[in-house]
Amino acid sequence: MRPVVLCFSGLDPSGGAGLQADIEAIGQAGAHAAIACTAITIQNSQQVFGFEACAANLVKDQATAVLDDLPVAAIKSGMLGTTDNIAMLTQLFAERLITADTPFVLDPVLVANSGGSLGDEKTLVSAFRELLPYATLITPNTHELRALSGEQDLHIGAQKLCAQGTYAVLVKTSHDFDSGDIEQYLYIKGEMVHKSTLPRLTGEFHGSGCSLASFIAGRLAMGDALIDAVRAADSWITQTLRAADAPHPNNEQAQLIPNRF
Ligand code: PLP
């Protein structure tokens, strides 16, 4: 069968972000997505109304059922929602229930694009410290990078995370809405090895970060080298955002939903 990416992610009922973004992006990368659902959110293209996280045991049981059964070739995490879920995923790596050479793409989701809370930021940040060293790649936006590293300077922040054990960091300026084009910097072992500039399209997109991280995880599962997976994701994500659906074309607050097909 196709290589499998096991995703730890939340349900977004609008279908823009979360596990639906993961399934569609990973499918487009040529792999098969399996999901351990971490939370059920209540949101639409305009607002997050709340969420209920799944208990860590429930998430673990979903994950181990898949790990025992399918050829898992990469792991991806998105919204984890609680420190218990972060600790549980850390434990899966520490206890080698996930094998050490399995590529792991960690999207350190702290808040939704719309600004809504997807967990308590301070406690999530400190719990992430234990998980980050297991990541092959983390994909923070500038807010997440600063929160995780405690550094304002993006270059120093990315180097610090690599020094703490993360293999690679892809820094995205996508959420700095008043900056010009979107820049993405890939650091491997603290060295910047790739920089891309993507056009900043009009509007805000719901689930662009999930889609990007999942597409990369899908390509890694398919055997791409990290830098090739990132390059492939650059052009794929631009195409999905150009084709995005606008549920409320006259409302600037409403986000667009990437068209991943
Ligand atoms: N995961 C879930 C379940 C979400 O609802 C969201 C945002 O709403 C995210 C992740 C992060 O989304 P984005 O890709 O827009 O950063």
Image (cartoon, grey):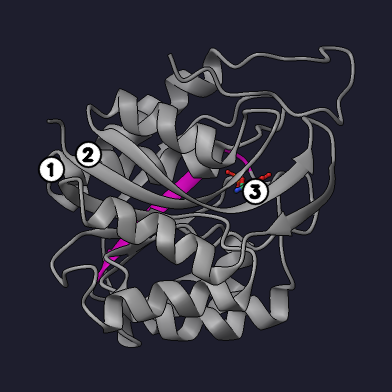
- Does the residue tagged 3 have its C-beta within 8 Å of any atom of ligand 1? yes
Some atom of ligand 1 lies within 8 Å of the CB belonging to the residue at label 2: no
| Quadrant of the rendering where the N terminus is positioned | top left
Mark 1 or 3, nearer chain start: 3
Horizontal arrangement in the rendering, residue 180 relative to residue 65 (left or right):
right
Q: Are marks 2 and 3 in contact (CB under 8 Å)?
A: no
State the image coordinates of residue 119 (x, y, percent, origin top left): 72, 66
Which one is in front in this view, the residue at disc 1 or the one at disc 3?
A: 1
Residue ID for mark 2: 219
Which element carries disc 1, helix, strand or loop?
loop
- Let me know if residue 150 appears in the view: no
Q: Amino acid at mark 2?
A: Arg
Where residue 206 sits, quadrant-wise, is top right
When the figure is inspected, residue 181 is found, relative to residue 81, above or below; the finding is above
Q: Does 42 appear in magenta? A: no
Circle nearer the N terminus (1, 2): 2
Helix, strand or loop under label 3: loop
Residue 183 visible to the viewer: yes
Give the side of residue 104 with respect to residue 155, left or right.
Answer: left
Q: How far apart, in angstroms, are the residues tagged by discs 2 and 3? A: 24 Å
Say the numbered circle drawn on residue 185: none
Cα gap from disc 1 to disc 2, whole angstroms = 6 Å
What residue is rendered at 32% in x and 86% in y?
Answer: 163
Q: Residue 215's x, y, as percent?
A: 34, 37
Residue holding disc 3:
175
Q: Nearer the viewer, residue 80 or 133?
A: 80
Residue at (24, 52) in percent of width and height: 74
Helix or strand or loop: what does disc 2 sit on? helix
Describe residue 84's horizontal placement relative to residue 131 as left or right: right
Q: Quadrant of residue 146?
A: bottom right
Magenta segment boundaries in residue numbering = 180-188
Q: Are marks 1 and 2 in contact (CB under 8 Å)?
A: yes
